[in-house]
Image (spheres, helix red, strand yellow):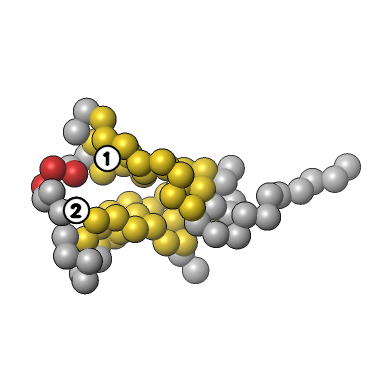
């Protein structure tokens, strides 16, 4: 029996959308990793908003308060 994992070695933002006042961000990346969604209002100061564990190479982040500021920026990073 052969078991293989895709060779995806980077974090990719797959899809972003807003529905019912919630921001959804789909992220793809290597399995068995934690990924952190960061939020900023000025691109200088970043605050972690959520941390998700990726089991199958895919996770979804949700921000229920995207209307707090119209200049809300997001980034995702893998935890070391």
- 21 versus 75 height, above or below: above
Residue 78 screen position, x and y as percent: 46, 61
Q: Check disc 1 and report its element: helix, strand or loop.
A: strand
Quadrant location of the N terminus in the rendered image: top right
Q: Residue placed at 44% from the left, 49% from the top?
A: 13
Residue in the foreground of this view, choosing between 5 and 44:
44
* Dot 2 alpha-carbon crowd within 10 angstroms: few under 14, some 14 to 19, many 20 or more: some
Q: Residue placed at 71% from the left, 49% from the top?
A: 5
Residue 53 screen position, x and y as percent: 48, 50
Quarter assignment of residue 46:
bottom left
Q: Is residue 34 left or right of residue 73?
A: right
Residue 59 screen position, x and y as percent: 46, 43
Quarter assignment of residue 25:
top left
Residue in the foreground of this view, choosing between 52 and 44:
44
Residue in the foreground of this view, choosing between 35 and 70:
70
Q: Residue placed at 79% from the left, 46% from the top?
A: 3
Which residue position holds label 2? Answer: 72
Q: Is residue 47 left or right of residue 29?
A: left
Quarter assignment of residue 45:
bottom left
In this view of the protein, can residue 50 be seen by the observer?
yes
Which residue position holds label 1? Answer: 23
* Dot 1 alpha-carbon crowd within 10 angstroms: few under 14, some 14 to 19, many 20 or more: some
Q: Is residue 69 left or right of residue 2?
A: left
- 24 versus 77 height, above or below: above
In this view of the protein, can residue 53 be seen by the observer?
no
Q: Residue placed at 19% from the left, 33% from the top?
A: 21
């Amino acid at each position: 029996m052969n078991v293989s994992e895709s060779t995806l070695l980077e974090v990719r933002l797959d899809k972003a959308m807003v529905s019912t006042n919630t921001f959804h961000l789909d992220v793809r990346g290597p399995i068995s990793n934690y990924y952190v969604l960061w939020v900023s209002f000025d691109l200088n100061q970043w605050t972690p908003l959520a941390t998700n564990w990726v089991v199958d190479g895919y996770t979804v982040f949700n921000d229920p308060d995207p209307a707090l500021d119209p200049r809300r920026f997001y980034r995702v990073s893998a935890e070391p």
